[in-house]
Image (cartoon, rainbow, N blue to C red):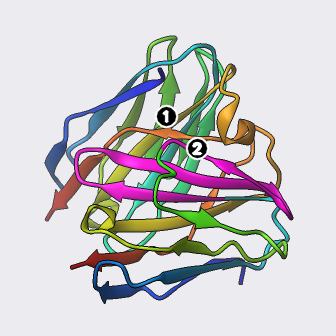
C-alpha cells in the first residue's frame, strides 16, 4: 500500500530534550516536506526537500532541522524543543517538485513539549 | 504574500441538505488550487486540483469550481460519511520557496452531516 509513515504518532516530552520524528514514504517520491498544523493558523511548511541531499527552509523553520540521506526518509529533528513547538506535525511527499503533483500526507505526529 | 481564507469555519447539515464551502484566495499568479479532506486523527487526503478559472471537477457528491478569486466545494445530498474538515490550498507561480511545490493552506471548514 502506498503510504507516508510517521513515527511516533504521539509524544510528550520536556523542554530541551532532543527528539526526532521519522518520516518514510514507499512511493519513490522525489519531493518531501514537513508541515505543522495549529488551530487558527492552518498548515504551515517547516522544511522541504526536492531530492536526496537537497533541503531548504519553508515558512517556519526556526528550531527545526532536517536531513535527506535517502530518498524514502526525511526525519524532522528538534535539537532543543520548546513549548511553542507543541503542535501537530505532518510529513508529505509528491512524485516530483513539479507544481501539478498532489502531495500525499502521513497521519500526523502530535507533539507536546512541557 | 499568498493568502487563503475559508468560510464558514464550521457547517452543520442534515443528510441530503446540499450546500457549498468557500475558499477565497490572494496569490501572485495561481498555479493550482487544491482541495483536501481531513478526518480526525488523519492527514489531509487529496480530492481535487483546479488550474484555471472556469474549471470544474467532480467526485461522487463533491464538485469543485474555480473563479479568479475563489473556489467553491459544492456538496450535493451529503451523507454522514462526508463529515470531515475540508482544506483548500494554493500554489503560486512566483513562489521561489517550497521548491515550486509549496502549498499555502486555509484553516479549513469543519463539516458535520447529521441523520
- State which chain disc 1 sits on: B
Residue B93 x/y as whole percent: 69, 21
Q: Residues within 10 Å of mark 1 (few under 14, many from 20)?
A: many
For this rendering, which residue is in front, A98 or A51? A51
- Marker disc for residue B64: 1
Image point 28% across, 84% down: which residue? Answer: A14
Residue A71 x/y as whole percent: 84, 72
Are discs 1 and 2 both within one chain? yes
Image point 57% across, 66% down: which residue? Answer: A91
Mark 1: which secondary structure?
strand
- Residue B47 located left or right of residue A100: left
- Residue assigned mark 2: B48
First of labels 1, 2 by sequence position? 2
Residue B23 x/y as whole percent: 37, 29
When the figure is inspected, residue A48 is found, relative to residue A109, above or below; the finding is above
Residue A37 is one of the magenta-drawn residues: yes
Residue A30 x/y as whole percent: 83, 60
Which quadrant holds the C terminus of chain A?
Answer: bottom left
Image point 39% across, 85% down: which residue? Answer: A17
- State which chain disc 2 sits on: B
- Marker disc for residue A52: none
Mark 2: which secondary structure?
strand
- Snapshot quadrant of residue A3: bottom right
Label 1 with label 2: CB-CB less than 8 Å: yes
Q: Residues within 10 Å of mark 2 (few under 14, many from 20)?
A: many
Residue B23 is one of the magenta-drawn residues: no
Q: Which residues are magenta?
A: A33-59
Image point 35% across, 87% down: which residue? Answer: A11
* Mark 1 and mark 2: Cα distance apart in space: 7 Å
For this rendering, which residue is in front, A68 or B108? A68
For this rendering, which residue is in front, A101 or B56? A101
**Predominant SS along the magenta part:** strand
Amino acid at each position: 500500500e502506498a503510504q507516508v509513515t510517521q513515527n511516533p504518532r504521539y509524544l510528550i516530552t520536556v523542554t530541551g530534550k532532543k527528539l526526532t520524528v521519522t518520516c518514510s514514504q514507499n512511493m519513490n517520491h522525489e519531493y518531501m516536506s514537513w508541515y505543522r498544523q495549529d488551530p487558527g493558523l492552518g498548515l504551515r511548511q517547516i522544511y522541504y526537500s526536492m531530492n536526496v541531499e537537497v533541503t531548504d527552509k519553508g515558512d517556519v523553520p526556526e528550531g527545526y532541522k532536517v536531513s535527506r540521506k535517502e530518498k524514502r526518509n526525511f526525519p524532522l529533528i528538534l535539537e532543543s524543543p520548546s513549548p511553542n513547538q507543541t503542535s501537530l506535525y505532518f510529513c508529505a511527499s509528491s512524485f516530483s517538485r513539479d507544481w501539478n503533483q498532489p502531495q500525499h500526507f502521513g497521519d500526523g505526529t502530535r507533539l507536546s513539549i512541557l | 504574500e499568498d493568502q487563503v481564507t475559508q468560510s464558514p469555519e464550521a457547517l452543520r447539515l442534515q443528510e441530503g441538505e446540499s450546500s457549498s464551502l468557500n475558499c477565497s484566495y490572494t496569490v501572485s499568479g495561481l498555479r493550482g488550487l487544491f482541495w483536501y479532506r481531513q478526518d480526525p486523527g488523519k492527514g489531509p487526503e487529496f480530492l481535487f486540483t483546479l488550474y484555471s478559472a472556469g474549471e470544474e471537477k467532480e467526485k461522487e457528491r463533491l464538485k469543485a469550481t474555480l473563479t479568479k478569486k475563489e473556489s467553491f466545494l459544492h456538496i450535493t445530498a451529503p451523507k454522514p460519511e462526508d463529515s470531515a474538515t475540508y482544506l483548500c490550498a494554493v500554489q503560486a507561480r512566483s513562489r521561489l520557496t517550497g521548491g515550486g511545490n509549496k502549498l499555502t493552506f486555509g484553516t479549513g471548514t469543519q463539516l458535520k452531516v447529521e441523520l
